[in-house]
Image (cartoon, rainbow, N blue to C red):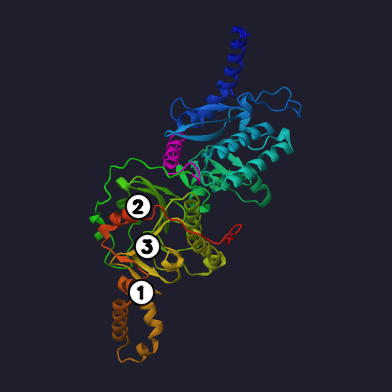
């Protein structure tokens, strides 16, 4: 006996009803706020016609308090998988038009299911979050739902790429899933994240703050560092997610994606010969160096607005993904502080987990001094950077551009931290500290007792710079493998990335490291 026409019509009616989610009025309200619906976002994220929905007919338990007469279509979340740039990606997209996208027991179990599918399939997982939070009527089961998501975020960490896209409000315990994932995207004016909202803060401690000031995209992108990428709109945000996914492998066991490259490995970068200012105290934008070296001058920067004295980004070299960590002298002379150390360490560990080679550009005067930094834990945070570089077993290349002083020299992937190959530009200065500071300490007596202290200081500083503040002393000791002309940087990096592509490194067998968190 086949499926009758009546059965087909019944199925289609049930399906089409569920696909409408919150209904026309709720959709209009969502659009009026400048937001798309869950299905509209999915249409933008995935290649046209490739999305396959899962568990459409899942329904909340009607026996729970006040839920017997309530209809929540698809239980407020759309789950499934499809193709992004021709590669499979799994998704859970909450829909605010359907009971505020609130998370209940079955809502959560739909997310659990698709996360399990992503891990079993070794494919990336993307969460599109737009939710009013836990479904109060369901009580503890909704809290258990969050716990199961956190658990899967943790199990999948370092195994598959996980991206959270904040497209609406998130409060309370719900904010911890985004924090457990690899990258967090937020949309200006419509995305909000906080543990407790403005009303509670005002009632408890009397502090006046708006939703945007407390947990908006710009607040988390500039102050807390929770947000990696800020977007202007839902459409802009999803385009940026598609771009990021193009750099990432499917899993830690998958090869890196390789795009067809129209750039040349032998391309010289003459603009780099003149990018470093004559005066050592002048800044310049290291992002120009990164883009000059990258295929077609393209890069995807993460955490652009947070801890800007260091830049982290993905580029391609001959079509292959490379992770870049670079001091940026445009901001605070490229100094390392507790925030920039965290930012770089997190990025390094992500790249190492997914077998992405690391390219470091060093121009660092040292660690930021002062009570603020010491009391904020610069020692512990700086140690994270040392730990991350030392732990990484992927190919590690370092280019010393200009200043590379003291402990910060070690921290920016020196040979002693496991760099596979260190190059230096002729402008490089590798030393314990700058010539002025060094001479004031080492030759204090000679300077103070001289007939002309200033002339003596200048004489000693010039001698120190000639002997130590250049790359050749380090090259003589093998600490620098090669001194190169800046214009040759792309050519040398492309050659070395290819040379180290099959690198394997055997480490001591143990359960895991204990990074100083």
User: Residue drawn at (45%, 70%), measured in percent from left and top?
Assistant: 407
Secondary structure type for disc 3 = strand
Residue interval drawn in magenta: 231-253
Q: Pointer 1: what residue?
A: 477
400 or 2, nearer to the observer: 2
Q: Closer to us: mark 3 or mark 2?
A: 2
Q: Which quadrant of the rendered structure holds the C terminus? A: bottom right
> Are the two marked residues, 2 and 1, in contact with CB atoms closer than 8 angstroms?
no
Mark 3–mark 1 Cα distance, whole angstroms, equals 14 Å
Q: Position of residue 23 (x, y in %)?
A: 58, 21
Q: Residue 453 has which mark?
A: none
Q: Pointer 3: what residue?
A: 421
Q: Which quadrant of the rendered structure holds the N terminus? A: top right
Query: Mark 1, residues whose alpha carbon is within 10 Å: few (<14), some, or many (≥20)?
Result: few
- Please indicate whether residue 155 sits to the left or right of residue 34 in the image: right
User: Residue drawn at (41%, 67%), measured in percent from left and top?
Assistant: 415
Q: Position of residue 184 (x, y in %)?
A: 51, 44
User: Residue drawn at (46%, 65%), measured in percent from left and top?
Assistant: 417
The mark nearer the N terminus, 3 or 1, is 3
The mark nearer the N terminus, 2 or 1, is 1
Q: Quadrant of residue 72?
A: top right
Q: Is residue 325 magenta?
A: no
> Are the two marked residues, 3 and 1, in contact with CB atoms closer than 8 angstroms?
no
Q: Is residue 239 magenta?
A: yes
Mark 3–mark 2 Cα distance, whole angstroms, equals 13 Å
207 or 368, nearer to the observer: 368
The mark nearer the N terminus, 3 or 2, is 3
Q: Position of residue 150 (x, y in %)?
A: 63, 44
């Amino acid at each position: 006996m086949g499926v009758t026409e009546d059965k087909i019509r019944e199925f289609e009616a049930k399906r089409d009803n569920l696909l409408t989610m919150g209904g026309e009025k709720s959709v209009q309200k969502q659009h009026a706020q400048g937001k798309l619906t869950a299905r509209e976002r999915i249409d933008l994220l995935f290649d046209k016609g490739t999305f396959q929905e899962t568990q459409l007919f899942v329904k909340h338990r009607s026996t729970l308090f006040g839920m017997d007469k309530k209809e929540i279509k698809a239980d407020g979340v759309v789950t499934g998988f499809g193709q992004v740039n021709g590669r499979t990606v799994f998704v859970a997209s909450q829909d605010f038009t359907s009971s505020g996208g609130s998370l209940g027991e079955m809502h959560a179990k739909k997310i659990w299911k698709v996360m399990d599918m992503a891990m079993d399939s070794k494919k990336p997982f993307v969460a599109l979050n737009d939710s009013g939070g836990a479904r109060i009527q369901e009580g503890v089961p909704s809290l258990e739902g969050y716990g199961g998501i956190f658990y899967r975020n943790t199990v999948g960490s370092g195994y598959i790429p996980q991206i959270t896209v904040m497209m609406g409000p998130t409060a309370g315990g719900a904010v911890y899933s985004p924090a457990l994932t690899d990258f967090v995207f937020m949309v200006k004016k419509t995305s909000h994240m906080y543990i407790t909202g403005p009303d509670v803060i005002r009632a408890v401690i009397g502090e006046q703050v708006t939703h945007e000031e407390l947990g908006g995209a710009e607040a988390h992108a500039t102050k807390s560092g929770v947000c990696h990428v800020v977007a202007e709109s839902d459409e802009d945000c999803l385009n940026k997610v598609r771009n990021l996914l193009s750099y990432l492998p499917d899993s830690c066991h998958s090869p890196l994606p390789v795009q067809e490259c129209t750039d040349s490995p032998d391309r010289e970068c003459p603009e780099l010969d003149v990018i470093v200012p004559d005066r050592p105290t002048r800044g310049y934008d290291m992002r120009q160096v990164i883009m000059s070296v990258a295929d077609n001058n393209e890069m995807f920067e993460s955490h652009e607005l947070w801890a800007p004295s260091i830049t982290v980004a993905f580029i391609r070299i001959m079509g292959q993904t490379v992770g870049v960590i670079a001091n940026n002298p445009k901001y605070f002379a490229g100094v390392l502080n507790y925030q920039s150390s965290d930012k770089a360490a997190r990025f390094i560990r992500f790249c190492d987990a997914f077998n992405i080679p690391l390219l470091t550009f060093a121009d660092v005067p040292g660690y930021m001094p002062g009570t603020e930094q010491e009391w904020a834990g610069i020692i512990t945070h700086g140690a994270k950077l040392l730990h991350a570089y030392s732990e990484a077993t992927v190919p590690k290349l370092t280019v010393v551009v200009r200043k590379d002083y003291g402990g910060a020299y070690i921290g920016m992937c020196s040979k002693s931290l496991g760099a596979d190959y260190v190059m230096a530009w002729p402008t490089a200065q590798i030393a314990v500290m700058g010539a002025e500071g060094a001479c004031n300490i080492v030759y204090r007596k000679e300077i103070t007792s001289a007939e002309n202290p200033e002339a003596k200081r200048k004489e000693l500083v010039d001698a120190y710079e000639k002997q130590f503040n250049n790359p050749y002393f380090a090259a003589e000791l093998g600490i620098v493998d090669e001194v190169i002309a800046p214009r040759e940087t792309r050519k040398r990096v492309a050659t070395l990335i290819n040379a180290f592509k099959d690198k394997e490194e055997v480490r001591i067998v143990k359960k895991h490291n204990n990074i100083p968190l």
